[in-house]
């Protein structure tokens, strides 16, 4: 059990590093592409490795802010329920949604810009967060446009992925009564990589939208 636990922990650590490493490499790659440049895999790995730590710290700080905000909203509703009962808690929940959703979206936009500032300007986490706050001030409309563009992109990629994965699922399901275990094995081997590719494309598309949006503003 100890060995299994260590392997799981190692896989989680590797996934976290790979996630932020790829984010840093992608941000730098989009910047070079806009300047008609190119980046090799080796250069991408080097850029990503140089910035994964600061991206992790930025994400951790925003995770704490999001968790604290959610705890405050839920805690307020719980206290209202204890003090005034069920009718009042519905009003409190409505107010929490009206306040919480815009705030959490603002945090998301703030984090997205902080990540790009950290990589493109080679800043520390707190410095990038401070500059992102100043950058976002007066640019909420830009942030909302990027949110919508990213959401539409996710829908498009998900739809294309479904067109590929859906028939594959149906094929495996049709083969199970005929082939039995071999068909299940085919599904286990084929479906996870297909899903991973779709998720990766969603991440690439979303990150590119925010990077292009930020660069469009600072390169004017």
Image (tube, rainbow, N blue to C red):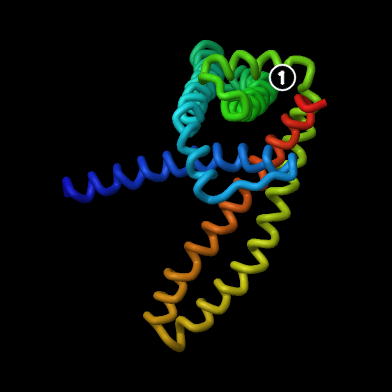
Q: Looking at the rendering, which quadrant does residue 102 occupy?
A: top right
What is the residue that sits farthest to the bottom in this orientation? 178
Q: Looking at the rendering, which quadrant does residue 88 occupy?
A: top right
- Nearer the observer, 60 or 66: 60
Q: Looking at the rendering, which quadrant does residue 134 occupy?
A: top right
User: Looking at the image, how many numbered discs can be counted on the residues?
Assistant: 1
Q: Position of residue 32 (x, y in %)?
A: 68, 40
Q: Position of residue 62 (x, y in %)?
A: 53, 24
In the picture shown, does residue 212 fall above or below 65?
below
- Nearer the observer, 31 or 101: 31
Any part of residue 57 in sight: yes
Left or right: 181, with 25 as reference point: left
What is the residue that sits farthest to the left in this orientation? 2
Q: Residue at x 55, y 20 (%)?
A: 123
Q: Residue at x 73, y 37 (%)?
A: 212
In the picture shown, does residue 215 fall above or below 68?
below
Any part of residue 90 in sight: no
Secondary structure state at the residue bearing disc 1: helix
Q: Residue at x 36, y 40 (%)?
A: 13
Give the crowd class for mark 1: few <14, some 14-19, many >=20 residues within 10 Å: some
Q: What residue sits right under mark 1 in the picture? A: 136
Q: Residue at x 60, y 13 (%)?
A: 130
| Quadrant of the snapshot with the C terminus | top right
In the picture shown, does residue 165 fall above or below 149?
below
Q: Position of residue 180 (x, y in %)?
A: 40, 83
Left or right: 208, with 9 as reference point: right
- Nearer the observer, 153 or 38: 38
């Amino acid at each position: 059990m100890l060995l299994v636990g260590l392997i799981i922990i190692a896989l989680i650590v590797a996934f976290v590093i790979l996630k932020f490493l790829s984010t840093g490499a992608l941000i730098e790659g989009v910047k070079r592409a806009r300047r008609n440049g190119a980046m090799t895999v080796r250069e991408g790995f080097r850029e990503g490795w140089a910035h994964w730590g600061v991206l992790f710290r930025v994400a951790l700080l925003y995770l704490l802010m999001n968790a604290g905000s959610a705890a405050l909203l839920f805690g307020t509703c719980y206290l209202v329920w204890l003090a005034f009962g069920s009718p009042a808690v519905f009003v409190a929940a409505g107010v929490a949604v009206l306040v919480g959703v815009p705030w959490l979206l603002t945090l998301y936009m703030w984090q997205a810009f902080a990540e790009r500032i950290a990589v493109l300007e080679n800043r520390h986490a707190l410095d990038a967060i401070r500059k992102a706050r100043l950058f976002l001030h007066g640019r909420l409309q830009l942030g909302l446009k990027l949110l919508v563009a990213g959401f539409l992109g996710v829908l498009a990629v998900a739809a294309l992925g479904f067109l590929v994965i859906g028939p594959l699922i149906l094929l495996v399901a049709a083969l199970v009564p005929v082939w039995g275990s071999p068909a299940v094995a085919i599904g286990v081997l084929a479906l996870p990589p297909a899903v991973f590719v779709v998720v990766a494309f969603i991440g690439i598309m979303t990150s590119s939208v925010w990077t292009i949006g930020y660069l469009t503003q600072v390169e004017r």
